[in-house]
Image: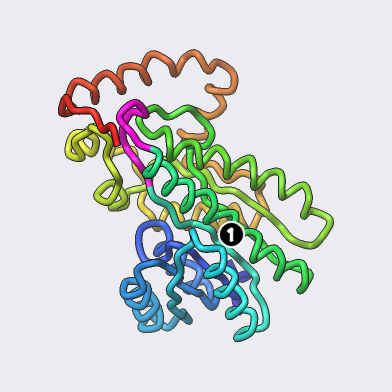
Amino acid sequence: MQKLANCVALVTGGASGLGRALCEQLAADGALTIVSDINIAKAREVAAAIRQCGGRAEAVLLDVSSEAEVRQVVGSVMASHGRLDFMFNNAGVAIVGELRDGNVADFRRVVDVNLFGVVHGTMAAYDAMLRQGFGHIVNISSMTGLMPTPILTAYSTTKWAIVGFSTSLRAEATTLGVKVSVACPGLVRTDMGEHNVYWNVRKEDHLAQLPWCWMIGPDQAARAILHGVLRNQEIIVFPFSVRVGWWIHRACPWIFAPPDARNVKALSCLAPQTMNLS
């Protein structure tokens, strides 16, 4: 982790969950951390807490769905600090429910934040890093970007796209001095489920079905991501159980079809019998 000392790192969605843990770990390892989030009050709280612990951090308001805002923030970091060593595109939102109960407006919001947020952050950081001749872009995907995940179709769509986007750009950037990695964690214990959009699914039923005992904490996830980043891994998949599941899915994808179908049926039986036709 000594490689992070005196580096400048920008984290999107840094005010809570995995983003907050990344900011705290980066600062603890000596990086100047830019905590960016659409919730500026919470971003300021995170930055203040980091400074109280002896780290260096700044808070910035950022809506990643706005290309102009992302470019302005990256430009401001470059102007203030003269470099950008790491760009962590982490901000994300999710929808829980079957597509038949959904609507395009909600789906578009997930794409705007999860996918175009990553595209905006990557392109702005990539331009800056190409000019300075170095840098590392880290895009946060998910295990749902490696395997089919019913009930999370919109979310999974964006996470699959992030994996393809990141691995393709890595091949382009490899001779230009810029590194690109994509992280695919398993379930991380955060409060994201409290803020999801739900399509004809009761939040309580969905949360009750989650395997909480198998989840990893955000601090553990942040350390695993940074470990993979410093090794310049292309796809950072963790914990080990997720890597095993990914290997099995690639070899025998049909194995996952029955449990996936049972999960959909279970939530469908519990859901209020109403259709969202908006």
Q: Residue 74: x percent and y percent?
A: 59, 73
Q: Which is nearer the eye, 256 or 41? A: 41
- Residue 9's place in the image compared with 100, above or below, is below
Residue found 52% across the figure and 51% down from its top? 140
Residue found 36% across the figure and 58% down from its top? 17
> In the image, is residue 95 part of the stretch drawn in magenta?
yes
- Residue 174's place in the image compared with 264, above or below, is below
Q: Which residues are magenta?
A: 94-103
Q: Residue 72: x percent and y percent?
A: 57, 75
In the drawing, does residue 6 fall left or right of residue 266?
Answer: right
For this orientation, the residue located farthest to the bottom is 80
What's the amino acid at mark 1? Answer: His
Marks counted in the figure total 1
Q: How is the image coloured?
A: rainbow
Residue underneath mark 1: 120
For this orientation, the residue located farthest to the right is 175
Residue found 47% across the figure and 14% down from its top? 255
Give the quarter of the figure containing the C terminus. Answer: top left
> In the image, is residue 227 part of the stretch drawn in magenta?
no
In the drawing, does residue 33 fall left or right of residue 83?
Answer: left
Q: Quadrant of residue 198?
A: top left
Q: Residue 240: x percent and y percent?
A: 49, 37
Q: In the structure shown, which secondary structural element does the residue marked by tag 1 occupy?
A: helix
Give the quarter of the figure containing the N terminus. Answer: bottom right
